[in-house]
Amino acid sequence: MTSDARFWNKIAAKYAKSPIRDEAAYRYTLERTRSYLKDGDTVAELGCGTGSTAIEFAPAVSRMVATDLSSAMLDVGKERAWDAGASNIEFHCAPAEQIPDGPYDAILAHNLLHLLPNTDEVLQSVAAALRPGGLFISKTPCLGEARGSLKYYLFKIAIPLMQLVGKAPSNVEFTRIADLEAAIQKAGFEIIETGNYPVDVPSRYLVARKRA
């Protein structure tokens, strides 16, 4: 078990009870994402956590595959899916680069990419698992956009201290929007929609289509 799996397992129960920080931004990105999904779609969500987003989208698609490296998070997700009657969700314990057999019409990654040490590898796996023309939809806190501000320096000080005492995962990237978009394009995607929800510090919402 990796150190990050242990971290997320340890906080799963507390995480499941935590309120969404920006409900309006979360709901807006759910609506935008749902607008791209169709009844017959097979969809995967990477880093699904406790399953809340997968459960939201399950009624809109044919098959939902939800993965996370934390078995404790998935246990909460399975219980929530049962309670919601979301019988078309399959939960898999796996790191983001190990995507269960597709192909998929869409792959989602919300609040995940900034926590990965191997983003390029994961994006390559996403491209390989999608059908031609399939969609990759992500939302990524871009902490690097605060560079030069007081908030940026507070992040730079606070995050390593939190990691030292086990209050943050081992990898947190200070992602810049331009770098994120370049990585997605390099993996074989055309970006077709962007937005920042919330704006400060930007959480970059991206919809990208796999090139044929």
Image (cartoon, rainbow, N blue to C red):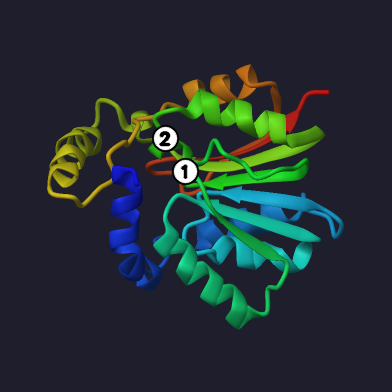
In contact (CB < 8 Å): disc 2 and disc 1: yes
In percent of width and height, residue 72 lies at 40, 64
Q: Residue at x 85, y 60 (%)?
A: 39
Q: Residue at x 48, y 21 (%)?
A: 179
Disc 2: CA contacts within 10 A as few (<14), some (14-19) or many (>=20): some
Nearest the viewer among 88 and 134 is 88
In percent of width and height, residue 100 lies at 65, 45
The tag on residue 116 is: 2
Identify residue for label 1.
Answer: 112
The tag on residue 198 is: none
Task: Determine the residue located farthest toward the bottom in the rendered image.
Answer: 83
In percent of width and height, residue 80 lies at 54, 75
Rendering quarter of residue 70: bottom left
Tell me the amino acid under the disc marked 1.
Leu
Going by the image, does 169 lie left or right of 158? right
Residue 22 visible in the current orientation: no
Q: Look at the numbered disc 1 and give the secondary structure of its residue.
A: loop
Residue 31 visible in the current orientation: yes
Q: CA distance from mark 2 to mark 1?
A: 7 Å
Tell me the amino acid under the disc marked 2.
Leu
Give the answer, above or below, for where 33 lies relative to 182.
Answer: below
Q: Residue at x 35, y 29 (%)?
A: 144
Image quadrant for the C terminus?
Answer: top right
